[in-house]
Image (spheres, helix red, strand yellow):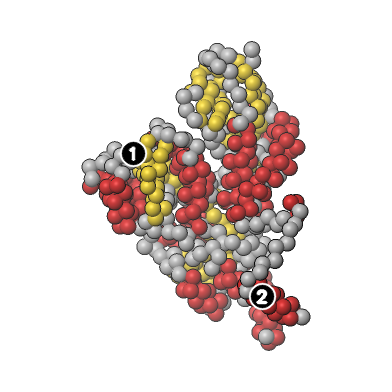
Amino acid sequence: MIRKTLLALCAIAAFNLSGCKLVKNLPEDEKAVSAGASGDAVRTEQRIADTFEAKLLPYVRDKALGFTAFRTALAGGLDEAGNIHGNRGSGQGAAWNFAIADEGVIVAAKLDTRARVADLDVDGDGAADMTIQLGPVIRGNALRDIAPFYNFDDFRDQIEFAKLGRALNDRISAEVVLPDGDLIGRTMRFTGVVPLKKADEKLLVTPVSVEILP
Amino acid sequence: MHIKRRLLITAMALGVFSATTGLAASAATIAIITPSHDNPFFKAEADGAEAKAKELGYDTMVLVHDDDPNKQSELFDTVIAAGVSAIILDNAGADASVAAVQKAKDAGIPSFLIDREITATGVAVSQIVSNNYQGAQLGAEEFVRLMGEEGEYAELVGKESDTNAGIRSQGYHDVIDQYPDLKMVARQTANWSQTEAYTVMESMLQANPGIKGVISGNDTMAMGARAALEAAGKNDVIVVGFDGSNDVRDSILAGGIKATVLQPAYQQAQLAVEQADQYIKTGSTGLDEKQLMDCVLINGDNASKLETFALSN
C-alpha cells in the first residue's frame, strides 16, 4: 500500500518535472515552517511573541530580590541560593541566573561604546556594587537562562537556542532609553538578571527595565 | 530476520543477567571513536575517555575515523560485531553519522556523543557538546575589546563539513557585526590546518595590509596565522583562536596570540563515559539527551592555569 502511494507520488513528481508546477495556496497561518535553520527566525519570533510579555517579564519581576536579600542569600553559598532563587542555564558549567530589582546611584558610566554600561552604588557606601548593561549590544544570555521554560532540548541545536538569547537581548535593548547629559550622580531604578558562575564574581546585570529617576 | 531478533533478545537477556550478577564487568568494552589524534584536541578527548573507562573497570577500543563518514560506518560495523557495551563518539559529520549511530542502536548498543551534534535526536543516548556558540561569543567579545571596537579584520573559517566551523563563525559574527566600525576585509577557510592558515594569511595580508586583527575558528589556524604575521613583521596584529590548546597557551604567555576559548574536551569525554557506565548499569542516564558544556575565555589572566584542554582552579 505504502509502496503504491510512493509510486504514485513518484509519478506525480515526474509529471511535474515535465513542465507544469502545482502550487497549493495555503492561508498564512497554515504555511509549514521549515524544521531546519531557515525556520529559526519564524520560530524565534513566535517564541518571543508567546513568552516575552506573557511569561518572561512577570517571571523576572516575581522572582526578583532586593540587593540586600540577594547578598544574604548568596552568603549561604551559590548553589543553595541558586536552588531557591535562581535558575541554571543549560548544561555543565552554566551560570546560575538571579533576578534582582533595586535602585542605586550611578557612580561610573561608559557610554562611548556600542556596549554601554553604568556602575551602580546600591548600598550607599560610594563604591560600585554592580554594572548594568545599557545596550545596544547586550552580552550574554541571562534573559534566556533565567527562564525555566526555555529548555535547550526543545531547540533544534545550539544555534537556534542562541538565536533566542540574542533576540531577547535585542528586544530589551530597544527599550532602553537614556536621558541626555551626564548620568553620574543620578539614581537608576532597575529590574534585571545577573548570571553567576562564582559567588564572588562581579555582578553584570542584563535589565528588563531601567529608569533614571528625576 | 526473526532468528536475528531472537538471538539479540537472548543476548540482551544474558547481558542483563550477567550485569546483575556482576560477571560482565571484567569483559565489558567501551569503544572510543574520534577524528585523528594528530589534532591534540581529539587526542585529549580519547585520552580522557580511555582513562575514565579504565578507572571504571572497562576495556577500551580506541579508533579514529579521520573525518571520513565511510570509514566511520565501517568502524561501527567492527565495534558492533565485537559486541561492545557502549560507544563514545566524536562524529564524522552531523547528517552522515545519524545512520551509523542508528545502526548501533538497532544492535542494542548505546552511543554517547561528544563535541559535535548530529541532526537527529532519539538515536544517541547522550549528546554532550561544547556550547560553541557561547564560546564564540566570548572570544568575539574579547576580540572586540582588544580591537577597541574598530578597524579592519580577517576571519579564518574551519572545515565546512564540520558543523562547529559554521557555529563558531555565526557566534563570532553575532557579536562582531553589532559593531559597525569593525570591518571584515577577508574571510576564508583554512580547513582547521596550521600550514594552510599560514598560506591563507600571507595572501590576505598582501591584499589587505591594513588588517589589525584576525579571528580564527580554531587554535591550529590561529598558530598558522600568527606565524605568517610574525614573518611579515606584523607582531601587533591581534589574533584570537578557539580550543584552548597548549600551543596557544604558550603563545599567549609569550605575548603572541591574545586569547582563545577553552573547550573542556578532557572533562567532556570523561563525563560521556560516566554516563555510559550509568546507562549500562541502570538502563538510563537520568539526564536529557542533549547537554551543553560552557566554554571558558582564556587570555593573559588565566592562561598559566591551562593544561591539555583542562583549566585548574
Tag nearer the camera, 2 or 1? 2
Q: Which mark is residue B212?
A: 1
Amino acid on which disc 1 is placed: Lys
Q: Position of residue B17 (x, y in %)?
A: 68, 75
Residue B299: name its quadrant. top left
Name the element at disc 1.
Answer: loop
Foreground residue among B193 and B61: B193
> Quick check: can you spot residue B312?
no
Above or below, comparing residue B308 to residue A211 in the picture: below
Foreground residue among B277 and A143: A143
Side of B141 where B110 appears, left or right: right
Chain designation of label 2: A
Residue at horizontal 66 percent and vertical 75 percent from the top: A15
Residue at horizontal 75 percent and vertical 51 percent from the top: A29
Side of B22 where B38 appears, left or right: left
Circle 1 crowding by C-alpha within 10 Å: few under 14, some 14–19, many from 20: some
Q: Position of residue B274 (x, y in %)?
A: 57, 59
Residue at horizontal 61 percent and vertical 27 percent from the top: A176
Above or below, comparing residue A40 to residue B12 in the picture: above
Chain designation of label 1: B
Residue furthest out toward the bottom: B3
Q: Position of residue B156 (x, y in %)?
A: 39, 50
Q: Position of residue B145 (x, y in %)?
A: 42, 34
- Name the residue tied to disc 2: A15
Amino acid on which disc 2 is placed: Phe
Circle 2 crowding by C-alpha within 10 Å: few under 14, some 14–19, many from 20: few
Residue at horizontal 63 percent and vertical 32 percent from the top: A172
> Quick check: can you spot residue B170?
yes
Tell me the quadrant of the picture where the N terminus of chain B can be found. bottom right
Name the element at disc 2.
Answer: helix
Foreground residue among A19 and A49: A19
Side of B113 where B12 appears, left or right: right
